[in-house]
Image: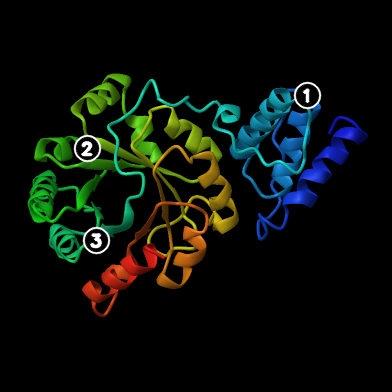
Amino acid sequence: MHDSNTLEMAKAIVAHHSATFAGFEPQPAPTPAAQESAYVAALHGCSQLGFIPTDAQCLASAWLAQTVRTGSFDATSWPVEPEDFGLQPVPRRLAFARCPQRLGLYAVLPNAEWVGRMARAGVPTVQLRFKSTDTVAVKREIAASVAAVHGTGALLFINDHWQAAIDAGAYGIHLGQEDLDALHSDQLGALRASGIRLGVSTHGYAEMVRADAVGPSYIAMGAVFPTTLKKMATAPQGVGRLGVYARLLRNYPQVAIGGIGAEQFGEVLATGVGSIAVVRALVNAANPETQAASLKALMQG
């Protein structure tokens, strides 16, 4: 830490925002990439608040940009302006085809049979997350899912298998950060040119900035709560973080995902997100169709 003034600035950040971001262990502050007091103070303050190094660096850069833009450092003002994070100005130069700003109830489902069931039950957005290394089975399941939503009005996203999704005429695809990183720029260009919609998973600020660079159709943020579905590389983000993420990404359709059950819909929707993704809340329900109706009612507040 530079000097007593910088230390006080960092302490002020922690004091003003610790209630919003309660429950996270302090993280070691990374080596500063800049020497300005606002940057160093934010780097240390955000690390104390539990943000991992890449996200603390992202926040520190944004806090410095905010300080320069406004002419003064303000510990009370958490950065939420897209320009301070270097996000693409709207309209974006690089952008995938648009999807609705509010995708509503978003069901993540294991196979085409489930996709058809939930589409017919009136779920507005469905995702096929079919796990298989058998390419023939994958293509068959994707084609069956496209057929299953026909005439229902449901928007179908395919998880991971983007080429098969394009071939089958799916509405959209959903990719994780690793999948996104694996794409060459010419593949990304071809994807964008195909007109297919793209949703991207994010787990914090650095991944949001990375996602914005490709101009996806929507951004998913999570995991909001603990989930047993897969080993999480990052800690649950919580509603406090979801709220500031939603303000930063307000120019994107946003999907909250991860461990969200009916009892948490109210607090999640209060952050301003326009969609909640559910897995177990539907697939494990005694009557999935009835559950879908009640979750849709909760989405409408």
- Ranked by sequence position, the earlier of labels 3 and 2 is 3
Label 3, secondary structure: give it: loop
Which residue lies at the image location 14% right of the left edge and 39% below the top edge?
164
Q: Quadrant of the C terminus?
A: bottom left
Between the residue at mark 1 and the residue at mark 3, the CA separation in whole angstroms equals 50 Å
Q: Is residue 124 above or below residue 214?
A: below
Q: Badge 3 is on which residue?
A: 123
Q: Position of residue 21 (x, y in %)?
A: 66, 54
Q: Residue, x 33% and y 55% (percent of image)? A: 104
At 19% from the left and 42% from the top, the residue drawn is 171
Q: Residues within 10 Å of mark 3 (few under 14, many from 20)?
A: many
The amino acid type, in three-letter code, at marker 2 is Trp
Q: Are marks 1 and 3 in contact (CB under 8 Å)?
A: no
Residue 190's quadrant in the figure?
top left
- How crowded pointer 2 is (Cα within 10 Å; few <14, some 14-19, many 20+) is rated as many
Left or right: 186 as drawn, with respect to 180: left
Is the N terminus in the top left, top right, bottom left or bottom right quadrant?
top right
Image marks 3 and 2: residues in contact by CB distance under 8 Å: no
Q: Which residue is mark 2?
A: 162
Image location (x, y in percent) of residue 203: 49, 46
Kindly identify which residue carries mark 1. 36
